[in-house]
Image: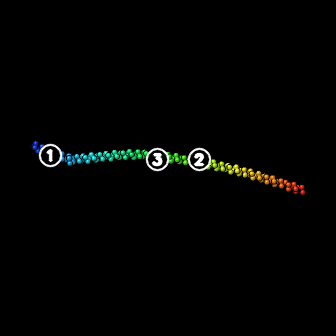
């Protein structure tokens, strides 16, 4: 049968406790320390990744906001330049119409003056011709 010797049981228990103490100092504590460091670095990396993701989202939001503002400014500048161009075009058209009207008026005045001179010349010629006709009729 099974005999239990107290002496051997105490020696085995002491041997077990000494081995556990030595393994705890040499193996378990360093392994637990490494596991703890690994867990801390993993948590730190995850938190850093979350922070970087949050910063990325903020950066994208800011970039979209800036891009929207830039587009609005560009659209406003385009509209302003377009309106200035239309105003300049209207002004040029008005100036051209004014000049054309002035040129037309000047041409009419010159034509009327030419007509008046032609009438005057014709009247003088009519008087000459009528004098000549009268002389020829009187001689005849």
Residue 129 position within the rendered picture, expressed as x and y whole percent measured from the top left: 83, 55
Q: In which quadrant will I find the C terminus?
A: bottom right
- Label 2 and label 1: CA atoms lie apart by 104 Å
Q: Residues within 10 Å of mark 2 (few under 14, many from 20)?
A: few
Pointer 3 residue: 67
Q: Is residue 63 left or right of residue 109?
A: left
Secondary structure, mark 1, is helix
Pick the residue in front: 102 or 35: 102
Q: Is residue 25 above or below residue 138?
A: above
Q: Residues within 10 Å of mark 3 (few under 14, many from 20)?
A: few
Mark 1 and mark 2 in contact (Cβ < 8 Å)?
no
- Label 3 and label 2: CA atoms lie apart by 30 Å
Secondary structure, mark 3, is helix
Residue, x 32% and y 47% (percent of image)? 45
Residue 38 position within the rendered picture, expressed as x and y whole percent measured from the top left: 28, 47
Mark 2 and mark 3 in contact (Cβ < 8 Å)?
no
- Label 1 and label 3: CA atoms lie apart by 75 Å
Pointer 1 residue: 15
Residue 65, located in which quarter of the rendered image?
top left
Query: Which disc number belongs to residue 87?
Result: 2
Please name which of the two marks, 2 or 1, marks the residue nearer to the observer.
2
Pick the residue in front: 3 or 111: 111
Secondary structure, mark 2, is helix
Residue, x 68% and y 49% (percent of image)? 102
Q: Which badge, 3 or 2, is on the more N-terminal residue?
A: 3
Q: Is residue 11 left or right of residue 33?
A: left
Q: Residues within 10 Å of mark 1 (few under 14, many from 20)?
A: few
Query: Which disc number belongs to residue 80?
Result: none
Q: In which quadrant will I find the N terminus?
A: top left
Residue, x 52% and y 46% (percent of image)? 76
């Amino acid at each position: 049968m099974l005999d239990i010797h107290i002496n051997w049981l105490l020696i085995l228990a002491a041997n077990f406790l000494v081995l556990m103490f030595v393994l705890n100092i040499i193996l378990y504590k360093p392994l637990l320390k490494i596991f703890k460091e690994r867990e801390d670095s993993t948590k730190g990396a995850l938190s850093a990744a979350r922070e970087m993701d949050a910063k990325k989202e903020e950066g994208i939001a800011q970039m979209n906001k800036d891009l929207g503002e830039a587009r609005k400014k560009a659209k406003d500048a385009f509209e302003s330049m377009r309106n200035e161009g239309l105003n300049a075009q209207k002004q040029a058209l008005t100036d051209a119409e004014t000049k054309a009207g002035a040129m037309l008026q000047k041409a009419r005045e010159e034509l009327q003056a030419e007509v008046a001179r032609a009438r005057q010349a014709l009247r003088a010629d009519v008087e000459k011709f009528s004098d000549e006709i009268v002389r020829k009729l009187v001689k005849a």
